[in-house]
Each structure stands twice: as structure tokens, then as C-alpha cells.
Image: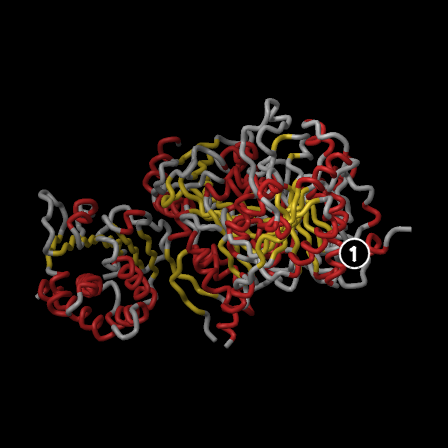
Amino acid sequence: MARKVKFLQGNEACVEGALMAGMTFYSGYPITPSTEIAELSAEKLPKIGGKFIQMEDEIAGIAAAIGASLTGAKVMTATSGPGFSLKQENIGYAALTEIPLVIVNVQRGGPSTGLPTAPGQGDVMQAMWGTHGDHPVICLTPDSVKETFDLTIRAFNLAEKYRMPVILLTDEITGHMREKIEIPEQSEIEVYNRIKPNLGDNYQAYKVEAGDLVPKMADFGSGFRYHVTGLMHDETGFPSNSTANAGRLMDRLMDKIEANKDDIITYEEIETEDAEYLILAYGGTARTAKAAVKTLRAEGIKVGLFRPITLWPFPNERVNTLSEQVKDIIVAELNYGQLILEVERVVKSNCPVRFCGKANGEVLTPDELIRKFKEVL
Amino acid sequence: MSKQLELRLSGSGGQGLITAGIILAEAALLDHKNAIQTQSYGPEARGGASKAEVIISDKSIDFPKVTLPNMSLALTQIACDKYISDITEDGTIIVDDSIVLPAQLVAKNIYRLPIIKTAIQEVGKEIVANIVALGLIVRLTGIVTDESLEKAILSRIPKGTEDLNKLALKKGYELAEGLLS
Amino acid sequence: MNHPLVENYFRMDKFPHIWCPGCGHGIIMASIARAIEKLGLDKDKVCIVSGIGCSSRAPGYMDFNTLHTTHGRALAFATGVKLANPDLEVIVIAGDGDLSAIGGNHLIHSARRNINLTTICFNNNIYGMTGGQYSPTTPTNEKGTTAPYGNIDKPFDIAKLAIGAGATYSARTTAYHVPQMDKLIEAAIKHKGFSLVEAISICPTYYGRKNKKGSVVDMMTWLKDNFVDVKVAEKLPQEKKEGKFLMGEFINIIEPEYTDQYAKIIEHFNK
């Protein structure tokens, strides 16, 4: 059977990817510009024996998904800015209780109700710091319809592998544009499933056994009768007030990211080998940057593009190395300067870091970026 | 014609212009070209002026939005007033003949044609004005092959309306041929 | 020697529990265990979900699949558990604040969907965990730490609220009326559809002390004297019902259940 060529919106490709990754449960609340994800999930899930439910609010949308994940389902919820804000508490809950889940945020213009049908990239820092308390975060951001498909699968795989919520941070640009996508066959897709304990094992719900990355995860109803709590807990899963225990648990949770950055971090580079200048852009804005790099290169300017695909954890080391090579870095994003803060932190004084952005609901055009590039250099 | 087409289709919600944009882009894919379609969302898509935009190119398309179209179609006065003056100097403007064009419009070609009238009088349904428009655009630009366009149309329309849409397409072609002859 | 019920259904190593002396919550928790035993449910197939608050600590002591979630959200988590695996018997334990204030939206929508969840509300008319603030069920004029001059809010009737929202089973009982509580909780679990049992608890530490309700025995006696079964009340003259609260089964009807309805959609595609 040949690969299917389709002409899909990013939001539609997200659902196609989720189904191929093994999604069997979706719960959420309608919000522009993410609704196509709910609509397509509602249509497709019952056909494969999966479940869809439209909950009463955004908080219930993520809560039901977490509950379903505990029964062994692969789960997803999708939202946009206001809903992402409402979901924050339970993102922290899933992080501490180590429950796999994919949260899609199709970013729109904000704050507040803002510009529901226009793009923005103002939730970048929220994706990292939105929920209270320190917690591990994985956040991926695609720049095309095909990559939305690929990264949705990757988000599921990372969620299952590291037992944590994974945020797919898209935007109205990639979510709503239609583009060609070649859908691979199921056999070509690598799917990771959570590791479950065997009946008869001396199961401790939050104990990492030798050779494992994370604790094995038993399905509710499969005979283990364990406890899950958002309180600090020990290896048995029950609440513990011990500060020594809390320290160990936090270290272990944070180390899931810290010790596995090489596995989690991906990025794309275009024309960086000989670059004297670097544009750093991500998500839909990277499309603007790609066009700008082509134009500038045609003019003989040695400029390259660095596009983080994994936003969090941020690709510190590679950006630092590039900052030693280039004379200047321009960060392009649809906000008042969010990821640039991380770039500045990483680059230190190696080279100047400039900003090109806007947050009025318009996309950044290649001409605007080129103009800014020439203005600052 | 191998240059990049940046097309804006505007009208009122319900005229099927978003569908027309998708059909044209899918026809381009069938011809092994690249295409991206975007559209207006929100209240404006449900009345007022709605628009769909399509970029078709032999090369890969980086920036997905149309900044300045080189072809622009408007089927209603409101859409025309809002969008039609954004056009490249060598661009082509097509409007329905029910529309009064603004003065001092700069474009290489400006056509006022009975698109909706053709759909009503010669095909029998106003709803296929979008397909008449597609026939017209494709015959003027040659951006996709006739075979691919017909295939793309037939895969997107409701069953039982094939003959109606084929006739609409033919009438669209004829409108263009009238201009070119 | 512990009672076999305790040995069978509780996590013995998790005791002592956190509740204050005289708290009514343990009575309700034990009643849930008795109902599960009476129904002969498979412990591996029972899931108990709670939110945040004193009562929400109960699942930690109970030997089932237990989920202690975020404040107010127990029903939303439980909905996900139940829809994903309808074979599980899902019971939600929630306090009055958890269920009817921060989680009120989930309560009315769970009732509206008629999803087969059993909710046991441990209603002690106060926020106990945070130290005695007034809740949506604190009676008007009573005091809490955040109502030092008396509560001016009108309280919710949770059992009635559930009925209004579409619950197909709703009942009220008290920590004093234990045999009745056992029966009602058993009936609620057995009921196919959304069921709610509002179990009136007592909080001598905060509610009792703040409102001068006397000893634990006094508070229990008050429950005994002021609640009348709805069936008994039907036959009582008006003057004897004056100032009394109704308990017992208020509604018990059968309507299409949510996970059954969803299964039909799936079934449609399996044909």
C-alpha cells in the first residue's frame, strides 16, 4: 500500500499523528483555534474503539485525560491560551504523579481572550513555568503540517517513556494552514508504550527499578491497587512529609530531563556551517525565517537559521556553541521577547542578541525580518 | 506558467470560496506542485467578508501566507471593498459583474465577469459560482491541469452533484476563453 | 485483633488516620467499605477518587485503586477513569467545599451526563483542612473563621442540587444514622447512573467549637434529633416537621447511562 498524500491543516495532522501513536482517549473543551483537534478526535476515536468526551470546562478536560491515562489509555487534550492557563494546576499534578499525557496548545494572540483567531507565541514561558513549583517539562514546537504530525507522535512517545505530561506548542499559523503531508504507514512509525509491572512482582508504584528510566506503571483495575496522590509521596506512592524524601523525589523528577537531554532535544539548522549571523526562530515564525535566510543568502549575506524543535528543555549547548561562531543572533518570535531571554542566558556575552517580534496578531513577514536584520547589523 | 501563484479568493461566507481554495491546492498537489492554503477565521468567516488564500509553486513554500496576491477574486462588493486593492502591479483582478470597482485600481488585468449570473442562469445553481470561478482562474493561469482540477473537484463535492459541478467548470472555462480569444 | 472488615478493605499500615478525635468521617468511610463488602465487589475493580480536604484523605486508607487528585476535580478525573474503563466501579469521595464550591461545575455536569459514578459527599459544613472557613453548606448565621460575624450566605442543599442537575439517584444520611447510611451507600453503588449520597458528618474541632455546638455526643444527638426520614416525614403533621431536615432516598430512577450510550456509538462502527 502506498503512502497516502493528504492536504491537511496542522490541527488535523495532529489527530492523525495521535491516532498513529496509539491515542485511545481524548477529553477537552472547545476553544479557538484548536477546535479541529477535538472535532476530528470526536469523529475518529469511536471508530477504533477509543473514547472522546467534551468536558464541562478546560480543567475537567485535562483531569479526565489524566484519569483515563491511569487505566492504560494513551490520552490527549488540546487547547489554546485561556484554556492553557486553566489547565496549569493539573499539568503540575501529572508531572508530580508521573502520568503520561499530551497537551496541545495552539497559541493565539493574547493575553486574556485576546485575538482568538490570530497567531501568537506568547505562551512559550508559560509552557515552562506555568504551573506552580519546580517540575520537569518537555515542550515541542512544529513549523509545518508534516512536523505537527511527527511531533504529536513524538510527544506521545516521550510522555510514555518519561511518564510525564508533554506539551505540543503549536500556533494558529501551523494549526490552521493546509499543506501537503505524506502519511507514513503504521509499520513505519516507532511507537513507545509505557512499561507495566507483572502480576506477582513486589510492586511499588513509585520505585524505579534497576535498569529502568521511570517507575513501571500499572493500569488501574489490573490487580495492583496502588495509590496516586499530588502530595509529595515516597516510593510506595503514599504521602510523606519527610523533607529528605521530598528532595529525593524532586531530584529524580528533574533528572528525568537533565540526564536525558540528548534523547529529548532536537533542532534544525539551515546554512549554519559558515554562518556569520544567526536567526533563531521556532514554530510558525520559523517559516518566515526560512524565507528570509534564502533571500539574504541570495544577496551574499552569510546567515543561518537555528530552529529549536524541542523548546524545553532548551538546546543550551548548541546555541552556546553557535554564539561563539557568529557575530550576531536575531531571535524572531510573536511576542514581546520570551525565548530571547533563554537565548541571552545561554549566549552570555559571546555575541549580541537582538530581537525581532510583534504581538498584534499578525505573522512576521520575511520582509519585516529582513528589514530588522539589516537595521541592526 | 511556472511562476508562483499567490491567489486570494474573497466573498461572503457560504459562497464556497474556502472549498474552492482547497480544491485548487489539491489539484496542484496532483500535478506534483506544492501548495498551501490559509483562510480567515472567526465571525468574519460566517458572513461579512471571508477569504481564502492559496499559494501554488513548483518550489517548496517557506512563508505560508499571502502578503500581496498576484491574483485576486472577489464575488461580493464588501469583499471587493476590503481586499481587492491589495494586488501586485502585474497582477490580475477578477470580480463578479455585480460589483462596482473602486477608481484608481492598479493591476495588469482587471476583469468584471458574470460569474454568479453564469452559475444561476447557465448551470442552474448559485452555489456553484465557486466552481465557475475556479474554471475561470485555471484557464487564465494554467496553474494546474484540467484533469487534476476535475479530479480534485469530484473528490470534494457531495455525491450526486458531479454533473452540475462539471457543467459549472465548463462554463468557467468558457468565460476565460471568451476573454482570451 | 482488628475487625475482618478493617483487615480486608483498609491499608492497615497507613493508620492512624489524620482525622481529629470525634470527626464523623471515619464512620462514613467504614460504611463505604461495608457496602462494598455487602455487594461482593472485586477489590481490584474498585477505584476510589477524591479531591482535596479532610475527607479526601480517605482513599489513602482504603485498599483499592485509589486516586487523590486536585481540589474540586475528583469527579472530572473519575469521569476519565470510568469512560476509559467502564468495568471499574468508580466511587468519588468529596467534602462539601470540594464538591459544591470549587468542584460545583463538575458535580452538576456529572449528574447531567448520568455517568455511572457514585459520589459520597462527606458534608461537615465547614472547610476543616484549612482551619474552619465557612463553606457553601455552612448554615446562614453560623460562624466560620472567615465569617466571624455570622455567615450571610444561603447554604446549598447538595442532594437537591444533584437532582436538579439530573442525578438519577440522590439520598441524604448522617453519621448518626449508620444502618440507614449503609443501605443508602449500597443502593447508590448498585445504581446504574450518577448517584449521590450526601452524608452529614460532624466537625467538632472547627464547626462545633466555633458555633458552640457542645461535645461530640451533643453534635451526634443533634443529628439524631433533627433529621427525619423522608418516608416518615410524609406521615407526620406539619408542626412535627418544623425545623427538621429530611434524609433518606429522594430520587431513584433509571435513565440511559453515559458509558452505555458511548458504547453504542462504538458498537455502531463494529457492525
Residue type at numbered disc 1: Tyr
Q: Is residue A123 left or right of residue C232?
A: left
x and y percentages locating residue A250 in the rendered image? 71, 40
Q: Is residue B51 left or right of residue A53?
A: left
x and y percentages locating residue B156 in the rendered image? 31, 67
Residue C52 in sight here: no
x and y percentages locating residue A149 in the rendered image? 48, 58
**Marker count (numbered):** 1
Between residue A269 and residue C50, name the one nearer to us.
C50
Residue to which mark 1 is pinned: A203
- Against A372, residue A156 (above or below) is below
x and y percentages locating residue A344 in the rendered image? 53, 32
**Residue extending furthest toward the top:** C149
Between residue A47 and residue B117, name the one nearer to us.
A47
Q: What is the chain identity of the residue bearing mark 1?
A: A
Between residue C237 and residue C93, name the one nearer to us.
C237
Q: Secondary structure at mark 1?
A: loop
Q: Quadrant of residue C194?
A: bottom right
Residue at point 62% right, 62% down? Answer: C85
- Against C270, residue A162 (above or below) is above
**Residue extending furthest toward the bottom:** C271
Between residue A132 and residue B177, name the one nearer to us.
A132
- Badge 1 local density, few (<14 within 10 Å), some, or many (20+)? many
Residue A191 in sight here: yes
Residue at point 69% right, 35% down? Answer: C129
Q: Quadrant of residue A157?
A: bottom right
Q: How is the image coloured?
A: secondary structure
